[in-house]
Image: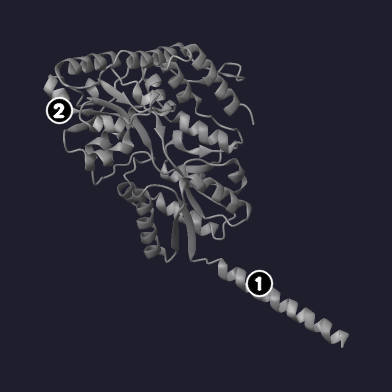
Amino acid sequence: MKKYLGFLAIGLSMVALSLSGCGKQASSDSSKITMFVSGDTAEGNAYSKMAKKYEEETNIKVEVTDVPYADLGTKISKAVQADDAPEVVRVSGIEPDWGSYLMDLSDVAKQAKTLESMTIKDEEDIVRGLPTDVTAVGLFINTDLFDEAGVDYPTSEEDIWTWDEFLDKLKTIQEKTDARYGMVMDDSDHRLRAFTYQFGGKDFFLNEGKDSYTTDEATKVALQKFIDLNEDGTMPKSVWTSGEDAASMFKSGLVPAYFSGSWQITDFSENIDSFKWKAVYMPYEETRATNMGGNFLAGFENSKNSEEGKKFIEWLYQPENYQQLCTYAGYLPAVEDMTVKYEHGQDAYEIYQNEIAAAAQPISGKQTNDQVTMTLKGYSGLTGSYKEKMVQVLNKEITLDEMIEAVEKDYDNGFLKK
């Protein structure tokens, strides 16, 4: 009897293992992959449309899952550690604990010609993240106010202003119209960095000894200029010190110029009807530059269907498909030599693409690339003290020198210490 029960137990165990194996096989559906996205309606809809097209062409279903931005990194990390990672993710950054699980996308980057300054590589120079899009700092103007004051503005790259020329024109507009201010700038270190680059500054960078961060005289000049513009009424100090919405101020029709970025184009195209506006080339003193941001596409080797996941990424970056994604999402392309036809604001998008092409490289993409790459390598990254300390300067709580010292310390802690 005991011998019989032993055989029965073995038999039941084999059945259980068989059923367990069947269950695992069923859950690993080779005809489906999962993509995590966190974005606005336009972006989520764009990826859903591309997923549908991919399924029609390949019979592979792409399940696009929208995850709240605040939860995305944690959700991916937990899935990765449980060996249940999504095949593909669209993210704004890459966590260090994903590193060893990320796909090698070097061949895709090479074939697609993704922008070098926005392509994320690890310490061994292996591509771990592809830029899905580029956001770029740029300039919008209220052409009605310029026309009312009889002030011209650049219509080509041959007649771009210097910053001094631009500021003189803004003073004229303030004198001759009801404009409340000359210009408004988003309260963002992205905009501040573009401003310093245009004055010939390198912002904050490693010293010759490679043991701490420093800055240069041109950056200091630019930062002091920014402070002066807030003090003399050219810009409303309230945007930086009190959080007043810069976009709303421009959309009121009472500010002639807005230093912001490409993400505003769709909104302005659809919602500004009380005055005429344009995107125009940004002024510069020494260096033509912007500051680029964006999001990234990555894949995981420990997902259930990683091979199909990589095929989907490769498919997305085929020129025709990537161009269509950019049209749907309103993306500035993150690949070289691509023209996109947009539903709104075609002229504005082309200005931004020309700005990116003409910008000093790689400095215009350095901030975003450094932040993502250094985090991938296990460094803590920056805390945002650049903007915070500038607010303190404008509130006269600290000096510019004290601000610079604090930002250098933030870089040392963020990019030199693990």
Q: Callout 2: few (<14), some (14-19), or many (20+) C-alpha neighbours within 10 Å?
A: some
Of callouts 1 and 2, the N-terminal one: 1
Q: Is residue 396 left or right of residue 212?
A: left
Residue 319 can be seen, yes or no: no
Relative image position of residue 292 (x, y in whole percent):
40, 32
139 and 405: which one is in front? 405
Residue displayed at 53% across by 43% down? 128
Which quarter of the image is occupied by the N terminus? bottom right
348 and 251: which one is in front? 251
Residue displayed at 47% across by 33% down? 368
Q: Is residue 175 left or right of residue 226?
A: left
Residue 144's disc is 2
286 and 78: which one is in front? 78
Amino acid type at mark 2: Asp
Q: Is residue 376 left or right of residue 66?
A: right
Relative image position of residue 363 (x, y in whole percent):
44, 26
Relative image position of residue 148 (x, y in whole percent):
12, 23
Q: Which residue is mark 1?
A: 20
Relative image position of residue 255 (x, y in whole percent):
23, 25
Amino acid type at mark 1: Ser
* Rendered image quadrant of residue 180: top left
Q: How is the image coloured?
A: one colour
Residue displayed at 28% across by 44% down? 340
Q: What distance separates the C-alpha of mark 1 from that of mark 2?
A: 70 Å
Which quarter of the image is occupied by the C terminus? top right
Residue 163 can be seen, yes or no: yes
